[in-house]
């Protein structure tokens, strides 16, 4: 199973790559697959180094809260 994570765009370079922040972890993603314009401050779902979909901030924060809860309650 593959999981895509929401991240907030913190920078975009001229080669269509962005740095996103996912709960304090920063990753570089390619924006070539996004089918709509994005700007700094937007949230995107990323997978395997690509941003694949823009989502609204409220939904992104809900998903990040769920991810945090899952990690905090991980069964060992």
Image (cartoon, grey):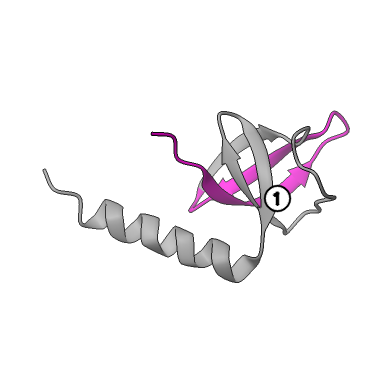
**Is residue 13 part of the magenta span, yes or no?**
yes
Image quarter for residue 29?
Answer: top right
Quadrant housing residue 67: bottom left
| Magenta stretch: includes residue 15 | yes
- The residue under the point 11% across, 43% down is 76
Residue 3 left/right relative to 27: left
> Number of marks in the image?
1
Extreme residue in the right direction:
14
Q: Residue furthest bottom?
A: 58
Of helix, strand and loop, which one carries label 1?
strand
Question: Where does the image place residue 53, in percent across and percent down from the top left?
Answer: 67, 47
75 and 2: which is toward the camera: 2
Residue drawn 85% across the image and 28% down it: 15
- In this rendering, the answer to whether 6 lies above or below 63 is above
Q: Which residue is mark 1?
A: 10
Give the x, y percent position of residue 70: 29, 55
Residue found at the very far left of the displayed protein: 76
At 75% from the left and 45% from the top, the residue drawn is 11
How dense is the environment of label 1, judged by Cα within 10 Å: few (below 14), some, or many (20 and up)?
some
Q: Provide residue 14's location: percent of width, then percent of height.
A: 88, 33
| Span highlighted in magenta in the image | 1-24
- Relative to 61, residue 50 above or below: above
Q: Is residue 54 left or right of residue 71?
A: right
């Amino acid at each position: 199973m593959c999981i895509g994570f929401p991240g907030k765009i913190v920078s975009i370079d001229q080669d269509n790559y962005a740095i996103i922040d996912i709960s304090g972890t920063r990753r570089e993603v390619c924006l070539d697959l996004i089918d709509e314009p994005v700007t700094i401050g937007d949230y995107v779902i990323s997978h395997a180094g690509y941003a694949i979909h823009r989502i609204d901030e409220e939904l992104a924060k809900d998903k990040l809260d769920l991810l945090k809860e899952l990690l905090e309650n991980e069964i060992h």
